[in-house]
Amino acid sequence: MTDMQKLYFAKRGEILVNNLKNRHFDAYYCENREQALEKAVSLIPAGASVGWGGALSAQQIGLMDAVRAGEYQPIDRDTCRTPEEREEAMRRCLLTDVFITGANAISMDGQMVNIDGNGNRVAAIVYGPKEVIVIAGMNKVEDTLDAAITRARTVAAPMNQQRFQLPNPCTVTGTCADCKSQTCICNQILITRHCRPVGRIKFILVGEELGL
């Protein structure tokens, strides 16, 4: 990453942190993934139950590994042996002390957009876990809410579909077809525009490109 990109992310990050705080989120800007990991770990109390949904950005900064190795009670759906166990783990995540997630997009005025297939991730963001930690690279930030929604639909979802390889149109074309496939991963679109109670959702913005 060039010095110009770092400055660009930092200046936008400063504005976005203030805008998120004005919406009663907690928000922090970290220059890199090492700082982001340190900040995230500091926000999770020892002994806490910790779950997560789709959170590639959190994986990339090493947060899942830190939770598994730390003094926490992780609910790790990736260790489940059957689909039934995995489903039960996702349900248990809705009652954790801390839920870790990413963002498909964030608007500069401080609104987050997430799009889900099963809905477990957006459900946890809305209600259930006592606290939510969002890890987001500055590449997820768009100037407007409309642009953030477009990013979630036409960038994040088709790119994630290349991971999942489900039989959906965007798997083949890389482009959203507004499909109604049984295996569609765009079934719920959540706009989180305000935090209630104050500070429940905590953003860690990272001055790098993370996630999809």
Image (spheres, rainbow, N blue to C red):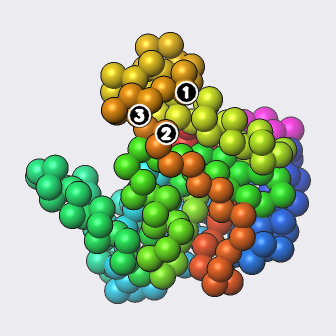
- Circle 1 — which element? loop
Q: CA distance from mark 3 to mark 1?
A: 9 Å
How far across and how far down the image is residue 154, in percent? 62, 29
Identified at 41% across, 34% down, the residue is 184
Name the secondary structure under disc 3.
loop
Q: Earlier in the sequence, mark 3 or mark 1?
A: 1
User: Which residue is tagged 1?
Assistant: 178
Amino acid type for the residue under numbered disc 2: Cys
Q: Quadrant of residue 86?
A: bottom left
Return the x and y of residue 157 as percentages of the image width and height. Answer: 52, 34
The residue indicated by pointer 3 is 184
Q: Main secondary structure of the magenta part?
A: helix
Q: Position of residue 7 (x, y in %)?
A: 86, 47
Q: Residue at x 62, y 72 (%)?
A: 202
Start and end of the magenta stretch?
1-5
Position of 60 relative to 68 (above/below) = above
The answer for how far apart the CA atoms under marks 3 and 2 are is 6 Å
Percent coordinates x, y for residue 40 in the rendering:
55, 70
Q: What is the tally of numbered marks visible in this picture?
A: 3
Between disc 2 and disc 1, whose residue precedes? 1
Q: Nearer the viewer, residue 108 or 194?
A: 194
Residue 3 on the magenta segment: yes
Which quadrant is the C terminus positioned in?
top right
Please say whether residue 126 is one of the residues in the magenta stretch. no
What label sits on residue 116 in the rendered view? Answer: none
Name the element at disc 2.
Answer: loop
In the rendered structure, which amino acid carries the disc numbered 1?
Asp
Residue denoted by label 2: 186
User: What residue is drawn where x is 29% and y is 77%?
Assistant: 73
Whether residue 147 can be seen here: yes
